[in-house]
Each structure stands twice: as structure tokens, then as C-alpha cells.
């Protein structure tokens, strides 16, 4: 019951502070715009002064271009939103002193952290679903129907990919006492994963492979990335456990 009450509080906080609305609008907008941008790219190039000469060199847009544009937009802007929405999850409550009030109810620190992560996970699941519905509809209008099951799986893999960075930022928020510092630590961790992913033979084991796997499901390729899936789940679990171990020893 304590878990459900705390989860309800966190979900209501996302609604009342309009963070859930902003997340839905941003991801939903990019879900709608991605196939449109892919379709209009040659026309956009023609409209740019001096660039019209390159427009004939751009191949006719295909449904694959729409999917690639969708994945790029959701991964880039989704990561930014994961950082912005999570950086103050704990650090801000420590700054304001509200964490102390919550934990004297008493609310176990493990539940305090877990409900924050679960609330953000549900928020991102809802908003990725909104983006997915918009992206599927516009792709259907501008190109043709995508494989529905492959599209669902792509969006679930994108959701898991974003949750890795939600968990990393939550850990950073526990480590620090300010939102700015938490954002800096989380951004550094993102850069580190990017650098490690550039090492030959390592990329296939990192979370960044999940969107690639999702796109492969839409092209009927048999490529899978189970190691990246397992490591992503392991990173989320490790971040949550590390956050709990650190938080339980902190003086608030």
C-alpha cells in the first residue's frame, strides 16, 4: 500500500507540474513530424537558397527514411527529456528539504526511489505510445502501412533505451545535491557510453543497439541484439541498486 500511495503521489506530481504534458507534446510532435520531414526533404532542400542544385541528388523518400527519421528524433530528444525530467527527482527534493518530510512518514528509501523510477517509466511508456501512434498514422498516409507488430516492438525497444538514461540520471540525482550537478554527471555518463560504443565490437552490446534492432524488425531481417537487451536491463538494475545503497547512507 505504501508503494501504491507513493507511486500515485509521483504520478500526480508529473501531471500537476505539466511535465507529463510537455513530454507527451514533444514526443508526440516528433512522432507526427518524422514521416512528414522524410517525405518533404527533397522539397525542403529545393527551398533553401543555394541548395536547390543538390535536391535532384536526394533519392525519392521511402518508408525506411520515415522510420530512420522517427528513430533519430525519438532517441535524440528522448535522451534530452530523460535528463531534464529526472535530474531533479532526488536532488531537488534534497535541496528543498521535502525528502526529509517524505521519509519520516515513514517511507522506506527503497520505495521512495523505486516509485520515482516507475512513475517516470510509465510516463515515458505513455508518451512513446503517443509518438508511436502519430508516427504510424502519418507513415500510413504518406507512404504505406508498416508492419504493426514490428512497429510496436520498435517502440518498446526505444522505451527501454530511454529508461537506461532515466536510471542513469536518477543515480546522478542521488549522487549530487543540485539539479545542475545531476545533469552534468548524467550527461558525462551519456558521453562515456557514446565513447565506449565507438570501440569496434563493443557497440553491439550497448543500449544504442536497441533502436537498431527495432528498425531491423521492420525490414524482415533476422538480426537480434539480445546481449544489448540484457545489458540494458542490467544497467537499469545496477543504477537503481547503486542509487539505493548510496541514498540509504546519506544524511538529509
Image (cartoon, rainbow, N blue to C red):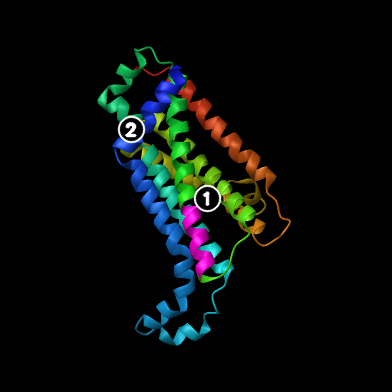
Residue 108 vs residue 209, the one in the foreground: 108
Residue 24, compared with residue 73, is above or below; it is above
Q: Secondary structure at mark 1?
A: helix
- Name the residue beneath numbered marker 2: 13
Magenta residues (range): 131-141
Task: Please report the residue visible at 65 percent of the width from the left and 39 percent of the height from the top.
Answer: 230
The first of marks 2 and 1 along the sequence is 2
- Mark on residue 154? none
The residue tagged 1 is 194
Asked if one can make out residue 248 in the rendered structure from this viewpoint, the answer is no
Disc 2 + disc 1, Cβ < 8 Å: no
Hey, which residue is sitting farthest right in the picture? Answer: 222
Out of 101 and 193, give the one closest to the viewer.
Answer: 101
Q: Quadrant of residue 19?
A: top left
Visible residue check, residue 204: yes
Q: Is residue 193 magenta?
A: no
Front: mark 2 or 1: 2
In the image, is residue 133 part of the stretch drawn in magenta?
yes
Where is residue 138 drawn, in percent x and y?
48, 64
- Name the residue at 43% across, 36% down: 120
| Mark 2 residue element | helix
Q: Position of residue 165 (x, y in %)?
A: 48, 42
Name the residue rendered at 55%, 70% in the picture: 143
Image coordinates for residue 81, horizontal then vertical, percent: 40, 46
Q: Where does residue 197 sit, x and y in percent of width and height? A: 58, 50
Specify few, some or many for label 2: CA neighbours under 10 Å numbering under 14, 14-19, or 20 or more. some
- Which residue is pictured at 62% across the width and 51% down the height? 203
Q: Is residue 213 above or below residue 65?
A: above
Secondary structure mostly seen in the magenta stretch: helix
Q: Residues within 10 Å of mark 1 (few under 14, many from 20)?
A: some
Amino acid at each position: 500500500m505504501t508503494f501504491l500511495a507513493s507511486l500515485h503521489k509521483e504520478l500526480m506530481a508529473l501531471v500537476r507540474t505539466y511535465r507529463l504534458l510537455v513530454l507527451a507534446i514533444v514526443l508526440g510532435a516528433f512522432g507526427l513530424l518524422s514521416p512528414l520531414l522524410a517525405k518533404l526533404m527533397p522539397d525542403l532542400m529545393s527551398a533553401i537558397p543555394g541548395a536547390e542544385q543538390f535536391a535532384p541528388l536526394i533519392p525519392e523518400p521511402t518508408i525506411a527514411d520515415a522510420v530512420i527519421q522517427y528513430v533519430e528524433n525519438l532517441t535524440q530528444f528522448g535522451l534530452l527529456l530523460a535528463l531534464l525530467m529526472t535530474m531533479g527527482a532526488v536532488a531537488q527534493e534534497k535541496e528543498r528539504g521535502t525528502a526529509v518530510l517524505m521519509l519520516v512518514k515513514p517511507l522506506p528509501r527503497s520505495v521512495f526511489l523505486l516509485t520515482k523510477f516507475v512513475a517516470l517509466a510509465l510516463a515515458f511508456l505513455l508518451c512513446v505510445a503517443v509518438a508511436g501512434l502519430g508516427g504510424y498514422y502519418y507513415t500510413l498516409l504518406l507512404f504505406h502501412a508498416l508492419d504493426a507488430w514490428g512497429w510496436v516492438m520498435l517502440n518498446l525497444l526505444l522505451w527501454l533505451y530511454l529508461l537506461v538514461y532515466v536510471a542513469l540520471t536518477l543515480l546522478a540525482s542521488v549522487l549530487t545535491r543540485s539539479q545542475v550537478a545531476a545533469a552534468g554527471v548524467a550527461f558525462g555518463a551519456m558521453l562515456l557510453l557514446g565513447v565506449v560504443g565507438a570501440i569496434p565490437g563493443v557497440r553491439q552490446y550497448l543500449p544504442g543497439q536497441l533502436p537498431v534492432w527495432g528498425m531491423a524488425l521492420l525490414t524482415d531481417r533476422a538480426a537480434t541484439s539480445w546481449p544489448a537487451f540484457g545489458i540494458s536491463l542490467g544497467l537499469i538494475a545496477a543504477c537503481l541498486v547503486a542509487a539505493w545503497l548510496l541514498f540509504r547512507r546519506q544524511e538529509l
